Amino acid sequence: MIKPILPIWLAAACMGVILALYIFAMIRSRAKLNKRIFGLVRLILMLGLLFVVNLRIMTKHYNTKVETKNIDILFVLDTTISMYANDYPNDATRMERALEDCEYIVEEMSGCNFALVRFDNRSQVLAPFTQDATCIRDAFSTITPLDFYYAKGSSLNTPYDDMESLLLSSYNKPDQTTIVFFITDGEITDESTLMDYSPLSAYVDSGAVLGYGTEEGASMTYSMSGVSYTMKDPETGQNAISKLDTQNLLKLAADLGVDYIRMDKSTNVSYLLDAIKAGGASSISDDNKASYEDTYFYYLIPLGALLLLEAFLFIRKKNM
């Protein structure tokens, strides 16, 4: 199979232009015919090899040994406007830091199954459990700020049903370890009360509530018709401030039976990831699975040799 770096038509067009320009220059050159032909042959070889490298030809291998982990990791991500408060260094938002930390977890827990639930006014399953890391990364990449017209305040109760459904599906798998990372600043602004999440603890083996923000708080940005604004307090007219709510975060963690981790940096969660990884990984050999291996580097060797030859001829010509 092939997985081109650039679209084939674009690579062919670029190389065709280069070849045409060289032929035009060769016709106008006063160099001996054999030198011009030799130069043309070298260029065709280099362009041909570069074209093949761009194709990224991959070979399929069967009967490979595949390592999998009997671990399901559920991300529950708060995407309300308060998560766009910028109380991190360099005006980074809570959401930016949270997405960085999620990428860190996915990288560290490679081979696990991942699922993602986001919630603001409503809860949405962006990805059911999958071992495809690209799929979960694509799901995270779809996260965008909620439009101000649709914002109705923050509630931590919204994702309960989707969490219950996904956690129960993982719990029912034999010998499966179920992990949950609930990612939020803990703020509730819609006058609701944090519901009891303890019934879900029966389906959770480990995990953490990851807290974002500061007690001092920060202003928030929101989107309206594609334009970003700073949210104002309707009573004072000043910038509205969102603050980390440690009390809600601690209660949520206690209900789920998991740790609470204040996320100042990605490595704050490292100790927990190490403990989870030690919990149960299994290597299996599956004849029905296939792996793909890049072969482009085989073509880089002759391409490199031709480039060295070209450099040698150029230096030699300059010294003559």
Image (tube, rainbow, N blue to C red):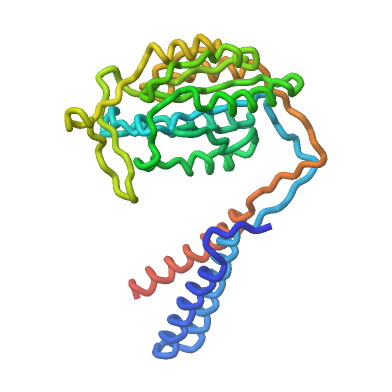
Along the line of sight, the residue nearer the viewer: 261 or 66 = 261
Depth order, front residue of 157/221: 157
Q: Is residue 100 left or right of residue 148?
A: right
The quadrant of the image that shows the C terminus is bottom left
Label count reads 0
Q: Answer yes or no: is residue 309 visible.
A: yes
Q: Residue at x 52, y 83 (%)?
A: 37
Q: Which residue is rendered at x = 30% and y = 49% of the image?
A: 227
Which image quarter: residue 231?
top left
Horizontal side of 86 relative to 312 (left or right) equals left
Q: Position of residue 260 (x, y in %)?
A: 45, 14
Q: Position of residue 79 (x, y in %)?
A: 43, 33
The spot of residue 66 in percent (x, y) is: 72, 34
- The quadrant of the picture occupied by the N terminus is bottom right
Q: In the drawing, does residue 120 fall left or right of residue 205?
A: left
289 above or below 225? above
Where's residue 67, x and y in %? 70, 31
314, 147: nearer the viewer: 147
The residue located at (54%, 64%) in the rendering is 7
Observer able to see residue 39: no
Q: Quadrant of residue 89?
A: top left
The residue under the point 48% across, 64% down is 307
> Would you place residue 163 above or below residue 292 in this image?
above
